[in-house]
Amino acid sequence: MSKYRGKAVVVNGNVEDVFSKIANLGAYQQYVDSMPADIKAKLGDVRFTDDSIVLNANPVGEIVLKQTRLESPSLIEMQAQNSPVPMALSIVTSPVGDSTEVVPSIDVEIPAMLRPLVGGKLQEAADKMSEILGMLLNR
């Protein structure tokens, strides 16, 4: 497995509150629906359900990241469904004073010869997840 770690994002709030916000995925769809078109465009084609994130990953199609493990207040894990390769998303939360550091990472099983071709895109995806979490949690 290859691991692509997103940039750490510091958000306001204690670790328990931030963990609860992240784990409650369904609450984000309302927020996304009310965003201006230009901000929505930056997010891309993403939907939230009560226990999953649905991404349109052209040309693959929809990839569903379904919550599979919650360890309050420090870890949320999601496994990809409909993905051409085994993939998981982990979000680690840790206290930083009165705030919380959030770090997403993508674990994906890809052949070594393909890593140079797709590694940069996967790192961009991990960084984009950091950006999305920062936007959603600091609103």
Image: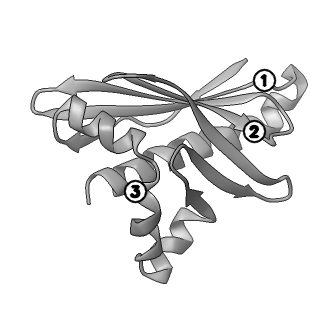
Amino acid type at circle 3 is: Ala
- Few, some or many residues within 10 Å of mark 2 (<14, 14–19, 20+): some
**Residue at 58% over, 60% down:** 47
Name of the residue lying farthest toward the front: 50
Percent of width and height locating residue 108: 72, 27
**Residue at 22% over, 37% down:** 17
**Residue at 87% over, 23% down:** 111
Q: Name the residue under label 1.
A: 109
Please tell me which of labels 1 and 2 falls first in the chain. Answer: 2
Label 2 – label 3 distance at C-alpha: 21 Å
Q: Are marks 1 and 2 in contact (CB under 8 Å)?
A: no
**Residue at 81% over, 43% down:** 82
- Few, some or many residues within 10 Å of mark 1 (<14, 14–19, 20+): some
Q: Residue 81 carries which label?
A: 2
- Few, some or many residues within 10 Å of mark 3 (<14, 14–19, 20+): some
Percent of width and height locating residue 126: 56, 40
Amino acid type at circle 1 is: Glu
Q: Residue 27 carries which label?
A: 3
Q: Are marks 2 and 3 in contact (CB under 8 Å)?
A: no
91 with respect to 96 (left or right): right
Label 1 – label 3 distance at C-alpha: 30 Å
| For residue 121, above or below residue 4 | below
Q: Residue 62 carries which label?
A: none
